[in-house]
Image (cartoon, grey):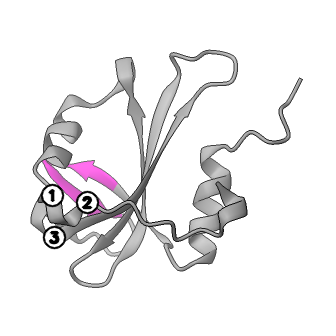
Amino acid sequence: MENKYAKHETNYINSYENLGYTDSYRFVNNQLRSTKTDTNYTPKEITIIKEHRYEGMSNPSDMSMLYVIETTDGGKGTLLTGYGPSANTELYEFLDKIPEENIKDENVLPPDAD
């Protein structure tokens, strides 16, 4: 039975895209890379605006994290990655290097989206 109130990663990604967070990022060679421009970013060039954690509806160990990101050159997008047992430890070591002042918890989505 599907929970109509359950929020999935794609729901949030679509909501953020509607707000201008249209880029997506991936972790390549110890840097975050824009899939739109192929620009690489170091931890100091990234601000995490918001993060969302998900657990699988049928399997709680199926976990993921969605990061809403802004970059120093004006890029805005998302990074979806595994969390828990499926986590990329190198990526999380990279994310730990993002300066504390670049970690926000801003509600950019309307209140009914959470």
Identify the element where label 2 is drawn.
loop
Name the side, left or right, on which 10 lies relative to 67. Answer: right
Name the side, left or right, on which 63 lies relative to 103. Answer: right
Quadrant holding the N terminus? top right
Q: Residue, x 64% and y 66% (percent of image)?
A: 15
- Residue 36 seen in this snapshot: no
Question: Which dot marks residue 100?
Answer: 1
Q: Which residue is mark 3?
A: 45
Report, in whole angstroms, how far the alpha carbon at label 2 lies from the one at label 1.
Answer: 5 Å
Q: Are marks 1 and 3 in contact (CB under 8 Å)?
A: no
Report, in whole angstroms, how far the alpha carbon at label 2 lies from the one at label 3.
Answer: 12 Å
Magenta region includes residue 58: no
Residues in magenta, as a range: 26-34
Q: Quadrant of residue 77?
A: bottom left
Q: Which residue is mark 2?
A: 103
Q: Are marks 2 and 1 in contact (CB under 8 Å)?
A: yes
